[in-house]
Image (cartoon, helix red, strand yellow):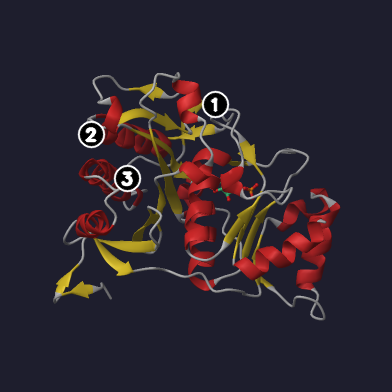
């Protein structure tokens, strides 16, 4: 049920106001920026929920910078986010998984400017089969000094001002952190508002559930194979398995129920498949804020990786702290 304060539901905007009062670093401009995300994701949700009734299944026909077939909904989601964030007035740079290069916006006060990066619709190939998909976003401060777009954008995850995602699942939920806990809002289609439904989420410390694409098991490095064999062994971890194949859906389950998600290095992606800046960093920020952990294949904290390029990829092990610590012992 939605959480009430003084008998009233708490909207996302109100929650941000509370955050500002308690944490002066979050400026009013930040709330205005975040309203661009809530507006765009309501628009995206309205398309996702009508897939099949309107023409949004299938490919748009082009191939994106990742070398992936662009889905019709990828375009819709990307344009919605760029449009609503483009006129916030305090967004200096927008970067998207779907676009080669970041977009620099003009007439933004350099002293109060943000960088926002997103995967507009992660897992979009699942749309045609009615499986959950998600929008993932991350926000950094745009350095006021003129150091060039590349240097401004390529910040470590520890510099994130906010990170979050919207999961278009059985309901539409927005989960975010701005460094003061992890909070969930559920879109009430009747109000057209995101209402607070979970506050200060803490990830269970340990759970016997792993989430990985088992088809690649024999293509993972040996340390991962040994960990997964141990996990499955009734005399070992005795784990069960859950894998949706849509990162936001797999992560959200782990945020709420605990467990561990792995996307190890493979032959196809020796450096990992998932994108560091606008997929792994925001999820790692949320995981750590919820008491969990997020590392790459070499055991380094995801949020401490120095990006070299905006579309960098990384391997990912993320989830309950004790699960990740247990898995990390196999990496040694
Ligand atoms: P695989 C979706 O394409 C995605 O980027 C993530 O949402 C998901 O976790 C991963 O790829 C699935 O990859 O190789 O298991 O199909």
Q: Is residue 200 left or right of residue 34?
A: right
> Which residue is most to the left?
7
- For residue 32, above or below residue 227: above
Query: What is the count of numbered marks?
Result: 3
The residue lying toward the viewer, choosing from 42 and 309, is 309
Q: Which of marks 1 and 2 is in front?
A: 2
| Lateral position of residue 325 relative to residue 70, left or right | right
Mark 1 falls on what kind of element?
loop
Q: Quadrant of residue 191?
A: bottom left
Note whether 88 is above or below 226 in the view shown: above
Q: Does the residue at mark 2 contact the one at mark 3 (Cβ under 8 Å)?
A: no
Determine the residue located farthest toward the bottom in the rendered image.
235
Does residue 125 lie above or below 166 as drawn? above
Visible residue check, residue 327: yes
Earlier residue among tags 2 and 3? 3
Residue under label 3 = 44
Q: Looking at the image, which residue is at 52% across and 59% down?
A: 288
| Disc 2: which residue | 88
């Amino acid at each position: 049920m939605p959480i009430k304060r003084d008998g009233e539901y708490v909207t996302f905007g109100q929650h941000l106001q509370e955050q500002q009062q308690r944490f002066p670093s979050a400026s009013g401009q930040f709330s205005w920026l975040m309203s661009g995300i809530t507006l765009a994701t309501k628009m995206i949700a309205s398309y996702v929920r009508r897939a099949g009734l309107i023409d949004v299944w299938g490919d748009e026909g082009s191939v994106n910078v990742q070398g992936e077939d662009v889905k019709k909904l990828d375009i819709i989601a990307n344009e919605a986010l760029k449009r609503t964030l483009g006129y916030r007035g305090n967004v200096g740079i927008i970067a998207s998984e779907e676009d080669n290069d970041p977009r620099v916006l003009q007439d933004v006060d350099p002293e109060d400017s943000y960088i926002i990066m997103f995967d507009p619709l992660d897992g979009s190939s699942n749309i045609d089969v009615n499986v959950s998909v998600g929008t993932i976003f991350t926000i950094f401060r745009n350095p006021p000094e003129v150091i060039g777009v590349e240097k401004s954008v390529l910040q470590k995850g520890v510099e994130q001002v906010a990170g979050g995602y919207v999961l278009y699942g059985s309901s539409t939920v927005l989960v975010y952190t701005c460094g003061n806990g992890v909070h969930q809002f559920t879109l009430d289609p009747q109000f057209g508002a995101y209402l607070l439904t979970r506050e200060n989420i803490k990830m269970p410390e340990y759970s016997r559930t792993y989430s990985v694409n088992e088809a690649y098991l024999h293509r993972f490095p040996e340390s991962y194979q040994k960990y997964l064999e141990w996990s499955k062994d009734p005399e070992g971890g005795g784990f069960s398995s859950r894998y949706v194949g849509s990162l936001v859906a797999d992560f959200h389950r782990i945020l709420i129920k605990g467990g561990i998600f792995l996307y190890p290095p493979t032959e196809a992606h020796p450096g990992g498949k998932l994108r560091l800046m606008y997929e792994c960093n925001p999820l790692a920020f949320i995981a750590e804020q919820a008491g969990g952990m997020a590392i790459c294949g070499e055991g380094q904290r995801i949020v401490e990786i120095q990006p070299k390029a905006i579309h960098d990829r990384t391997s990912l092990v993320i989830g309950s702290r004790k699960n990740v610590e247990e898995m990390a012992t196999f990496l040694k």
